[in-house]
Image: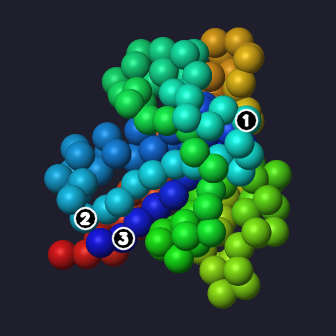
């Protein structure tokens, strides 16, 4: 079983959205059972809290369910447990690389490296922003997850 961890700052907007989007895409392709998908934050600002209401609303408007998740912070065991650790922005990437044991640093990369339309960019944090901020973050995440799906379909364990 392959495993993917999405990481943002507080694990209440971007990373749970990415988790929900990829879970939905995997389910549509009948691949859910072959992957473990999770999300976490680099900081403990909202531990144990559900995704931010605006993030849940935007996800729901686009057919994704991100409810039922609670914020958690990346832990030492995550670096061993997950095959891929995908950060939403450069700050998250630096934070992850700062705490990851050297042998696991190659697992950590930006989510948008898998994007066609937004390659080389970062998913901006929509927290406390406008509806358009949440829409843009979701659009970027969807595009990157579609690119990631292309890779996963080719390399999915049988």
Residue at the outermost bottom position = 103
Query: Which residue appears at 34% of the width and 24% of the height?
Result: 63
Residue 134 visible from this viewpoint: yes
Position of 142 compared to 90: left or right? left
Secondary structure, mark 3, is strand
Query: Which numbered mark, 3 or 1, is in the foreground of this view?
Result: 1
Report the Cα–Cα distance between label 1 and label 2. 32 Å
User: How far apart are the two marked residues, 3 and 2, measured between alpha carbons?
Assistant: 7 Å
Asked where in the image residue 120 lies, by quadrant, the reply is bottom right
SS class, disc 1: loop
Name the residue carrying label 1: 45
Residue 130 in the image: state x and y as whole percent: 71, 12
Image quadrant containing the N terminus: bottom left
Labels 3 and 1: the sequence-earlier one: 3
Q: Is mark 2 on a helix, strand or loop?
A: helix
Q: Mark 2 points at which residue?
A: 34
CA separation in Å, label 3 and label 1: 29 Å
Where on the picture, by quarter, is residue 154? bottom left
Instruction: Give me the disc on residue 117.
Output: none
Q: Is residue 39 left or right of residue 89?
A: left
Q: Do the residues labelled 3 and 2 touch (CB within 8 Å)?
A: yes
- Label located before the other in sequence (1 or 2): 2
Q: Which of 101 and 117 is in front in this view?
A: 101
Badge 3 or badge 2: first in the primary sequence: 3
Give the residue at x 62% y 37%: 47
Q: Name the residue under label 3.
A: 2
Do we see residue 146 in this rendering?
no
Residue at 18% in and 75% down: 158
Badge 3 crowding class, 10 Å Cα cut-off, few under 14, some 14 to 19, many 20 or more, is some
Between circles 1 and 2, the one closer to the viewer is 1
Q: In this view, does 17 lie above or below 117?
A: above
Which percent across, then down, holds residue 144?
Answer: 53, 49
């Amino acid at each position: 079983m392959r495993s993917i961890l999405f990481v943002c700052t507080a694990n209440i907007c971007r990373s749970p959205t990415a988790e929900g989007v990829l879970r939905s895409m995997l389910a549509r392709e009948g691949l859910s059972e072959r992957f473990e998908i999770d999300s976490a934050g680099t900081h403990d600002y909202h531990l144990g809290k559900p995704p931010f209401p605006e993030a849940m609303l935007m996800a729901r408007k686009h057919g994704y369910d991100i409810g039922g998740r609670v914020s958690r912070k990346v832990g030492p065991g995550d670096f061993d447990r997950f095959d891929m650790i995908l950060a939403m922005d450069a700050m998250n990437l630096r934070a992850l690389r700062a705490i990851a044991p050297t042998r696991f640093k190659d697992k950590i990369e930006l989510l948008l490296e898998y994007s066609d339309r937004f390659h080389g960019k970062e998913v901006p944090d929509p927290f406390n922003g406008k509806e358009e901020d949440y829409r843009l973050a979701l659009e970027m995440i969807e595009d990157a997850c579609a690119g990631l799906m292309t890779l996963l379909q080719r390399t999915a364990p049988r």
